[in-house]
Image: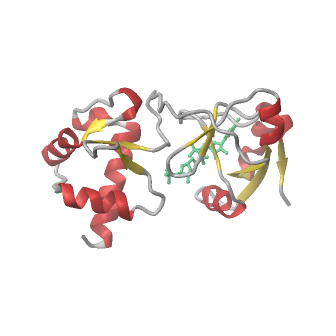
Amino acid sequence: MDEKHLIRASKRLSRHLRHAPGDIGIALGPGGWVEVDTLLAALRRHGLHLTRAELDEVVEGNDKRRFAFDDDGLRIRASQGHSVAVDLALPAATPPDVLYHGTVARFLDAIRDEGLKPMNRHAVHLSATVETARTVGGRRGVPVVLLVDTRGMAAAGYEFQVSANGVWLTAAVPPEFLRRLP
Ligand code: HQG
C-alpha cells in the first residue's frame, strides 16, 4: 500500500472508530471494539475498499499505533482519542512522577482557572515526554508544554490509565498540579 493510501485509510479509521461510527452505519461495542468483518464491509459500502491484509498494514504502519486488534484478531478498536462515550476498560496504572501536556498559549488562561479538561474527548491526554507534548501542542500553533505533577495527583487519589499506544489518560487535571515549562 502506498503512503497516501495508508494515511487516507488511517484517517477514516480514526474518524469511525473514535468519533463517528454512525457515518458508516456501525456502532462501537463494549470497550470500543468493532468486528473487523463488519468494519471492512461498512467501509466498502462507503467507498473505501480495504482487504484484511491492508487493514493489518494500516494498523502496523500507523505512526502512533492508534489502532489495536483484540487477542484473536477478530475485533479492532482505537486505543484512545474517542469523542463518543466509550469505556476502554483499561486497568488503573501508576504514572511516572511527572507527565506532560502540550497545548497553545490561547488556552492558558482557561487552563489556569479550571485545569485541564477532556474537552471533546473521553479523557485528558498526557504525554510521557516533553517532545511528544510539544508535537501534540504544535498541531494548534506554537506549542506550550505544561508539566503535570502526576505524583501529587496520584497521592491525592486521582486515577490514571495508559492506552495500548502509551498515551496517559486521566479524567481531569486541577490547576494546582500544573506548571508551565519555560
Ligand atoms: C485544551 C492527538 C481550554 C487542551 C494528539 C487541548 C493527542 C483546554 C485541547 C490526542 C482546557 C483539546 C489528544 C480548558 C484542555 N480550557 N482549553 N480547561 N483543558 N484544553 O485534541 O491533548 O493524532 O482533544 O490543551 O497527538 O490536544 O488524534 O486533546 O489543546 O495524543 O491520535 O483543549 O490527539 O492524537 O484538544 O490531543 P484535544 P489533545 P491523534
Residue 110 is left or right of residue 35, and the answer is right
Residue at x 48% of width, y 58% of height:
64
Height in image: 20 above or below 5?
Answer: above
Locate ligand 1 by image quadrant. top right
Please identify the residue farthest to the bottom as the structure is shown: 2
Residue located at (69% from left, 40% from top): 94
Q: Where is residue 97 in the image (x, y as percent from the top left)?
A: 79, 47
Q: Quadrant of the C terminus?
A: bottom right
Q: In which quarter of the image is the N terminus?
A: bottom left
Asked whether 14 or 152 is in front, the reply is 152
At x 29%, y 63%, the residue is 57
Q: Which of 59 and 113 is in front in this view?
A: 59
Q: Is residue 89 above or below residue 108?
A: above
Q: Quick check: 31 left or right of 124?
A: left
User: Can you tell which quarter of the image residue 3 is in?
Assistant: bottom left
Task: Provide residue 2's location: percent of width, then percent of height.
Answer: 27, 73
Instruction: Give the image location of residue 181, x and y in percent.
Output: 83, 56
| Nearer the observer, 122 or 79 | 79
Q: Is residue 45 left or right of residue 77?
A: left
On the image, the x and y values in percent for residue 153 come to 79, 34
The color scheme shown is secondary structure
The residue positioned farthest toward the front in the image shown:
72
